[in-house]
Image (cartoon, rainbow, N blue to C red):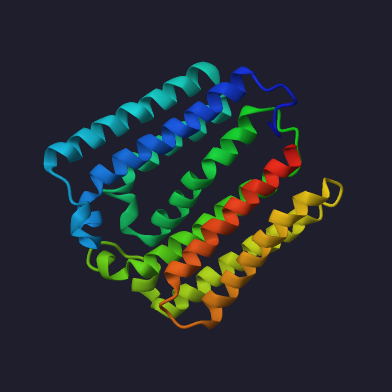
Amino acid sequence: MLSNGPYWFTTAKVVSPAVMGLSVLSASLYHFGAANSMYARKNEVLSVEPFVRRALIGLGVLGLALAVYLAVNYLNAACQIVVALDALIIVAYAGLLSRHWLTKNILMAFVCASPVLLGWLAGHRLHPAVPYGIGVTFLTYLTREVVKDIQDRVVNHGHRLTLPLWLGVMPARRIASGLMFATTVVSVVFGTKLISYNWYTMIPYVLSLGLFLMTSYSLAFSQPGKEKKESAYILLGSFLMLVTFGCILF
């Protein structure tokens, strides 16, 4: 809506959300099947039978293929590239890309930011605030990937080389803090663009900014063990940023 003018129903506005939703659902199904052994290491309850794993992988591949098909037939070339990259990353993630922190964290942050990127690319890129949303989303989920790796370091040991297993927990927390601070900086620059909008737009924005700052401080100065709460703060802050964009629209 922010990127493609005032009309509610255009091809891009109908197809791009459908592609986003289909990609996310299919990626979830595929990954739960393909990486089920890792989920089972976290909790035995999450272990499923081989037939179920194969079914989940098959449904995931089918959904990703359908998302690519819709993008190729109804969206522009830039959107097609994003959707195809998402599909390739997800298919290669469980068995290959998740083994090293560099590909694991950066590529998964790209996948998490791609719905916002797709919405921007599917339209005419009319609204100057959207690129800040893309930057905030990417950095937010890059931070969360590092925090989740700290939580999962026992599960990942011997299977993946994540930042906390490579550098240690505290260095990984400080890196995550720096990424969260970078998110905050981008958010502050974004905030200077919000002054001309409705006053209520600032409410979720300020709350989101506060959560980002709290998370950055906690990651830098608190002892390990608070990662679950910090991850929740990150998700809540990103949700409030999404609400901020909704307030811009209305």
Q: Name the spot of residue 179 as percent of width and height, x first.
A: 57, 65
The structure residue drawn at horizontal position 74% and vertical position 53%, both measured from the top left corner, is 190
Side of 121 where 143 appears, left or right: left
Query: In x, y percent, where is residue 62?
Result: 31, 26
Q: Position of residue 10 (x, y in %)?
A: 64, 18
Looking at the picture, tell me which residue is in the foreground, 155 or 205: 205
Residue at image coords 39%, 76%? 167
Q: In which quadrant will I find the N terminus?
A: top right
Task: In the rendered view, tell whether residue 166 sits above or below residue 78.
Answer: below
Image height of 227 relative to 115, above or below: below
Of residue 227 and residue 149, the one placed in the foreground of this image is 227
Residue 101 to residue 215: above or below: above
* Residue occupying the point 68% across, 41% down: 246
Residue 105 found in image quarter: bottom left
Q: Is residue 203 left or right of residue 25?
A: right
Q: If the image is split into quadrants, where does the C terminus sit?
A: top right
Question: Does residue 40 appear to the left or right of 27 in the view shown?
Answer: left
Task: Name the residue at 43% across, 68% down.
Answer: 228
- Residue farthest right in this picture: 196
